[in-house]
Image: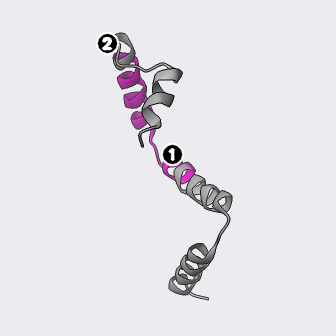
Amino acid sequence: MDIQTKKLSLINRIIQHKDESILDKIALIFEEEKLQDLTEEDIIQRSEKAEKDYKEGKIFTTEELLKISESW
């Protein structure tokens, strides 16, 4: 089976699938893959930005985030 056929087969299976937990697992695979593509420099830059945001008070408590996410 060539790669295009595999892609189409997977797309069709995803479209027909009724179990949301499977879709969540598929999404997680893509997120993990994206994270693995980060270079050391990317990780350092993200860490530095996070530290800067924290020092500038650009953060949310868990409660605030949950409240914000209710409107999504």
Circles 2 and 1: CB atoms closer than 8 Å = no
> Magenta part mainly helix, strand or loop?
helix
Characterize the local packing of mark 2: few (<14), some (14-19) or many (20 or more) Cα atoms within 10 angstroms: few
Residue hosting label 1: 35
Q: Which mark is residue 47?
A: none
Residue 15 image point, x, y percent: 56, 75
Say if 55 sits above or below 60 in the image: above
Side of 16 where 63 appears, left or right: left
At horizontal 49% and vertical 51% (from top left) the residue drawn is 34
Q: Secondary structure at mark 2?
A: loop
Q: Is residue 16 magenta?
A: no
Say if 58 sits above or below 7 in the image: above
| First to last magenta residue range | 32-52
Residue 22 image point, x, y percent: 67, 61
Name the residue type under label 2: Glu
| 3D distance between C-alphas at marks 2 and 1 | 26 Å
At horizontal 59% and vertical 52% (from top left) the residue drawn is 28
Q: Is any part of residue 40 visible from this angle?
A: no
Name the residue type under label 1: Leu
- The quarter in which the N terminus is drawn is bottom right
Quadrant hosting residue 49? top left
At horizontal 51% and vertical 45% (from top left) the residue drawn is 35
Residue hosting label 2: 56
Q: Secondary structure at mark 1?
A: helix
Side of 10 where 51 appears, left or right: left
Characterize the local packing of mark 1: few (<14), some (14-19) or many (20 or more) Cα atoms within 10 angstroms: few
Say if 9 sits above or below 50 in the image: below
